Amino acid sequence: MLDTAFSIPLVALSDIGRVISLLVIGGGLLWILIRSLRAKEVDRRIVFLFIFIAVAAPILFPITFQERATLIVKRVFDKVESSPAGSKVLLAFDFDPAMAPEVQPMADAFSRHCLEKGHKVIFMTLWATGQALLTQSLERVVRGEYPDKLDGVDYINLGFKAGNENVLNIIVTDFRMMFPTDVNGVPLDSTSIFDDVKSCKDLDLIIAIGGGKPGVKEWVLYIGDRVNVPMAAGVAAVVAPQLYPYYPKQLLGLLGGVKGAAEYESELVKWYPHLKERGTPGLRMMGPQTLAHMVVMAFIVIGNISYFISRRRERIQ
Amino acid sequence: MRRSTIIVMAAVFGLFILSWILRSTSLASVQEHYLIGGLKVTFSAFLTLAILSFLYKDNPFYKFAEHLFVGISAAFWMSMGFWTTIVGNLIPRLSRSLSEFFQVPYQPGSYNFVYFIPVILGIMLLMRLSSKYGWFARWPLAFIVGTFAGLNFVRYLRSDFVEQVSATFVPLLVGWQGVGHFVSNFSLSASGQFVAIVGNWVIFLGVICGIIYFFFSKEHKGAFGAASRVGIWILMITFGASFGYTVMGRISLLVGRITFLFRDWLNLIS
Amino acid sequence: MKHKSLVILLFIFCAFTLSAAQEDAAPVDTVQVDSILPPAPVSMLTAKDGENDHGHSITLRWELSADDGAGQNSVLSYEIFRWVPFFMDTLQSIQDSLEQTEAYIAELRTFLPRAEKRLKEYRKRKKPKLVIVIFVDSTQFYEDTIAASKRLLPEYEEQLKQLRQWRKQAIDEIPQAHTSYPEQGEWRKVGTALSGQANFKDVGVKERKSHDYMADHTDYYYRVDAVTADPAIRASSEIVGPVQSYGQLFNTGRIPVFVAVLVFCLLTILFVTRARRGAELYVRPLAGIEAVDDAIGRATEMGKPILYVLGLGTAADIGTIASFTILGRVAKRVAEYQTKLIVPCYDPIVMTVAQETVKAAYLDAGRPDDYYEDIVYFVTQSQFAYVAAVNGTMLRELPATNMYMGVFFAESLILAETGALAGSIQIAGTDQVAQLPFFIVACDYTLIGEELYAASAYLGREPILLGSLKAQDYAKAAVIILAALGLLAASLDWTAFINLFSVTS
């Protein structure tokens, strides 16, 4: 009884951290609003500091939200899920380390989903800097989590080939002319995964992941529209808006930025709960993302209020 | 150099060494080459913070990181260009002995002699460096511009014109079964009839008015001007949405970097 | 003549051997399964040349078996069989021998120089070492092996030449061999279709040397078996054939694209011709371009340089090409006002073209001596390294005017923000939709998308540029009309009109 009387109720440190950070941000925004109403300038470095706190606090004290896949993401998921086991899926890792925080989570999610379904996955990249990221992904996800999958049978890494969209121009009719061997020097003819694959026409699904040039647009122009193979995309947020015109006719679905990655991960974890313990970086990133967006929205509102007030003041004067 | 600058630089250097020692110590039980591992993480964190310091003001650390990035990227791409394009694509088709020398698989073919043409064009392009024979470079440049234009002309017309025009053929009244049916089944859900109808109207009007804005052969007056103004509104709303998407992208990159600093460098999170 | 008879002799020998040793194409299970009755065969089987391709493919269509999804519901799959003459096995064995011989020759060619090098090293050693005493036979081994390899190499090369000739002759004989149906061949499975599937495309390759070569203008015969869970219980369709594959000169699935190309080309030629003849082609004024002259004047008054960024595109990108015209105009004004111009470049080829453009502009302005090479310089081909360097330039040189014209990507906002920080007036123009919001927000004037191309036509006044712009405008008018008609068609279900714009392959 003495123990119970003197025991301190245990409150998670992270809960305290969340509350403090929200109070700091809320208080700070209020202070900025008051300064703006008084027509006082706010140094841009204060804005940078706020963004830093809005991003750093949810990383230190995680805040997570429920995600639900929108139709544009669900169509990609459904296609991978409904394709029969053994379907040939090509994953193009057309991104560099600068884009990796956004698109790596979706690349990993696609790899896991395809391997869970027993699809035959062909990995390749059109970016020189994408090769290292592809190798890391293979080590971490494919070999690390699916050690029973065999190279050349269940998956294959074709690596990087210089030539940008001209590589696509060739593999649309003949893979072997551009990739006579895989990245380890094994001839494609001696791999079972390429037994009945001569060109992109023989694939069941192409998923282009990227955000620059060459990227999804080139895949649609050079491959998707030419051979009518179903094509999906996962892109960095900055290029997502310009790919919407291709949906739903030329692209069956599109994952835009971390939000798209989080939606795909939430759908994946719903169908394959055991994948949750392997990490959901997209879902984890939505906490700092959401808070930062709210801070940006608050700044836009405050900025506009300040603008209209100062205009009214000038008119009065 | 000012005294304060020297003090700051010394302090940063000291912090760098301290961070390296601490990081290496924490990696000692996990990695074999913990000193190198610690140096890599510390140096990455240092460069990240040096670039971010530009947000405060321009400083020697930012300049150092900028120049290091420029120099290394130039060398990286030169090396990449040689090993991936020349050694990866050209040499395996040109010569068996060269392929053996560079240890790449030789790709025999009946038409391999054709690959000497890009070699000649590439040399002609390099002659730009000579003031007397620089005019040689115009021919491969013309070839590059012409080939790309020819290759892309039909592709863009197909994917970005014909297919897009076809995608604009949307019915204005989706699943229309009369006013009564529309009112009785009214809902604001994304898959509902009302949203589908509004969406199609927006697509149609947006396409028409947007195209009118980019019409350069007529001055934008009267009804044409009104449609053009609707078009620019549609464009600005689109740009706003695109801007929001891009803000999300930039924040994601910041989240990635801060996660690296907190997890890999400072070990504050698992 | 001698080789032809040899080929025929070889064929007869192989045919005799194979016919004695051949297996039945369809496996026969000796166990009788009473519960599954043979299914109904497919009906209405047709075989036609594959459409809109370069040949080497046959498309099969059939009516589903009555027991596929109905009746007994016992059909699991369909197996497609093609009649293959025994002669194809002869060709296969020639191919295999050829590949083996090529591999031997490649091995010998790799081995010989290395062996000769190793032998040289052994012979050079002057001091007698234990290793040489123990392995003195190695030298002899290498000498013997090199001698044998040098003897074998020309033999293999001769054999390769012979085999290549036989292969060529055998490939030419393929159509002839297929006329020996049905005696000199057998049925072989070429593919499988799942239940519910009523078509199959038998696709070969056009490379004559490939194992999967499917000759055109050759008689092919097909049959389709409806197969149950027990592979032995099946029903074969009627045999269909002879059917020949051949390539089409024109892909009818792409007629809409062809019409669009034709119409657009005709419009462009028409308007370029009119522009060349001196017709006045109206282009509405653009705010961004009218501000260029003011911006250049501002820079001159302030005694500060003008920074012109061509973007991250290549010389083949349209945005970059339009930017060259604007650069030419800006450079000419800059030369007239004797203001400093800074043009940092991302792409080496763009740099060469920009140097030419600026040099020509200075010449036009009558100031060739004011031009120097460092006006236009290469920075780096790494995106963010480039922008870091340009930012540095902006903050050090503090230009009065920044112009961003061309293809930009993620670095656009960084550039525009830094320029605003440096206090420069900024005029931007890009066709990259993703970057337009940043330029619109951070710059004083922005040329949105096609306005960049219109600006280059407006400034350059070249007939080709003006004519193309006019053609584009007429194409836009056509799009508006088609969109309105398409709207009507979609609303009133005029599928014929909608299908006119459908591109199938």
Image: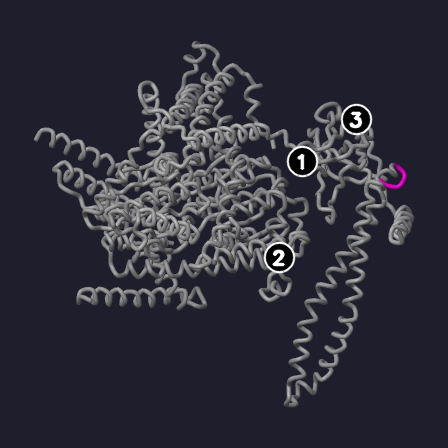
Q: Nearer the viewer, mark 3 or mark 2?
A: 2
Chain of the residue displaying label 2:
B
Q: Hey, what amino acid is under mark 2?
A: Arg
Instruction: Bin the neighbour count of mark 3 within 10 Å (Cα to Cα): few under 14, some 14-19, many 20 and up.
Output: many
Q: Hey, what amino acid is under mark 3?
A: Ala
Please tell me which residue lies in front, A292 or B228.
B228
Which residue is rendered at x = 39% and y = 68% of the image?
Answer: B35
How many angstroms separate mark 1 from mark 2 (CA)? 28 Å
Residue contact at pointers 1 and 2, CB within 8 angstroms? no
From the image, tell me which residue sits under label 3.
Answer: C40
**In the depicted structure, whether residue A96 falls above or below residue C109:** above
From the image, tell me which residue sits under label 2.
Answer: B93
Query: Where does the image place residue C111, in percent across and percent down from the top left?
Result: 69, 69
From the image, tell me which residue sits under label 1.
Answer: C53
Q: Is residue B223 visible?
A: yes
How many angstroms separate mark 1 from mark 3 (CA)? 33 Å
